[in-house]
Image (cartoon, grey):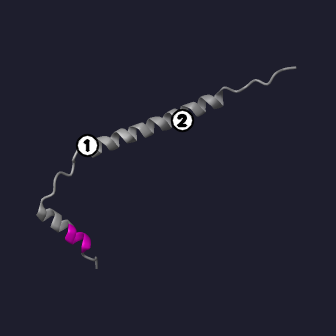
Amino acid sequence: MAEKSKSVLLPVVAAAVFAGLGRMVLQKIIADRKARGSNVAGPLDEKTRAWISEVVRTPRK
């Protein structure tokens, strides 16, 4: 009797997909840590804080 040949394609594709997803997750985590570590916006002075608060609280017409 001839045995069924097992396809190697599906496990290889599955491994590639999981590896790709894992790499994307790691890149996202690293990018988030770098973004959190760098203070791109900079510190806000009191005048700027008051202006932002006023703009956010004022209802739009």
Q: Nearer the viewer, residue 2 or 48?
A: 48
Magenta run includes residue 58: no
Question: Which numbered disc covers residue 54?
Answer: none
For the N terminus, the quadrant is top right
Identify the amino acid type marked 2.
Phe
Q: Position of residue 10 (x, y in %)?
A: 65, 31
Considering the numbered disc 1 on the image, is that residue within a helix, a strand or a loop? Answer: helix
Question: Which numbered disc covers residue 18?
Answer: 2
Q: Which residue is mark 1?
A: 37
Q: Position of residue 15 (x, y in %)?
A: 57, 31
Residues shaded magenta: 53-57
Dominant secondary-structure state across the stretch colored magenta: helix
Left or right: 4 as drawn, with respect to 52: right
Q: Residues within 10 Å of mark 2 (few under 14, many from 20)?
A: few
Precedes in sequence: disc 2 or disc 1: 2
At horizontal 45% and vertical 35% (from top left) the residue drawn is 23
Q: Position of residue 58 (x, y in %)?
A: 24, 75
Left or right: 58 as drawn, with respect to 19: left
